[in-house]
Image: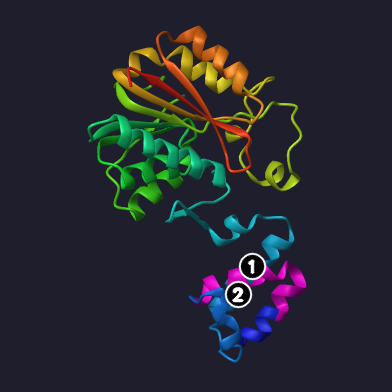
Amino acid sequence: MRVEELLVYGKAHCHSDFAKILLADIIGKNPLELLTCLDLEVEKECCEKYKRAVCAIEKGTPLQYALGKVNFYGVEFSIDERVLIPRFETEELVENTIKYINEFFTQPVDIIDLGCGSGVIGLTLEKKVSTNFVDLVDISEKALEVTHKNCGKLNSKANIIKSDMFSNVEKKYDVIISNPPYIRDDEEIEDIVKKNEPHLALYAGSDGLDCYRKILSTIKPHMKDRCLIAFEIGYLQKEPIFKLVEEYLEDVKIICKQDLSEKDRMIFILKNL
């Protein structure tokens, strides 16, 4: 089939933008280039792959899962239904964490990414700052399979640890970062998220704070004398998380930052910084 025929097929089954993005990715073109190669014959294998992806999107699969990858902070990561789709807000968490590391630490630093999922946070930090080591931790074996794949793609030296937060972790860290599950069990979320993304990585108890409690109640033995803790949070969770920090930690500075939508989205806890 020709590019033009495939685009007609795609647009009949999903949003035209998705049809273009999928086809361009499969044939190795920029979406803007497609109009210049409408008569290009596409190999049968690529045609079949395109049609499968289009049909998956028509049935409700997110575009990122159909592509099997996502761009996060300028780096391409593999993802699928075993892990969450990274959001822009998480890129902001990483960007602010990099700023704090550069401001407060004489690098290299020791980093742990708790609930790492596909590994985008820890692996991005490994690329952007100088590190002694990066530990990527998740309770899900399926998620860690994706993490391992991304480590291989990026030639990462990160350590992959199966653990329920700190339960199988013994080291101390300069930087402890996490985008944990923080949705209430009864909270209404978009159908496309609820039906496709792993619930283990979404829900966190009746108030959405279970993971923060688990982390903060066990964090002290894993903090170096000078330490940065970075959390992504639900936009209504600032006050209860501040209270949890005050309950479990002393002599720390707590900073909340907003995302680009001006919603409370990140909490940074500074010890001796």
Compared with residue 22, is residue 106 higher up or lower down, i.e. above or below? above
Q: Locate the C terminus and report the quarter of the image it occupies.
A: top left
Left or right of 183 on screen, residue 216 = left
Query: Furthest residue to the bottom?
Result: 39
Tag shown at residue 48: 2
Residue in the image at 41% along x and 16% along y = 219
Label 1, on which residue?
A: 52
Observer-nearest of 142 and 179: 179
Circles 1 and 2, Cβ within 8 Å, touching? The answer is yes
For disc 1, the neighbor class at 10 Å (few under 14, some 14 to 19, many from 20) is few
Q: Locate the N terminus and report the quarter of the image it occupies.
A: bottom right
In this picture, which residue range is highlighted in magenta? 8-27
Q: Mark 1: which amino acid?
A: Arg
Compared with residue 62, is residue 207 higher up or lower down, i.e. above or below? above
Mark 1 and mark 2: Cα distance apart in space: 6 Å
Q: Secondary structure at mark 2?
A: helix
Q: Is residue 225 magenta?
A: no
Q: Mark 2: which amino acid?
A: Glu
Residue in the image at 47% along x and 12% along y = 217
Q: Secondary structure at mark 1?
A: helix
How far across and how far down the image is residue 260, in percent? 58, 43
Q: Main SS type for the magenta part?
A: helix
Left or right of 240 on screen, residue 186 = right
For disc 2, the neighbor class at 10 Å (few under 14, some 14 to 19, many from 20) is few
Residue in the image at 75% along x and 27% along y = 186
Observer-nearest of 76 and 100: 100
Residue in the image at 35% along x and 48% along y = 151
Compared with residue 96, is residue 21 higher up or lower down, i.e. above or below? below
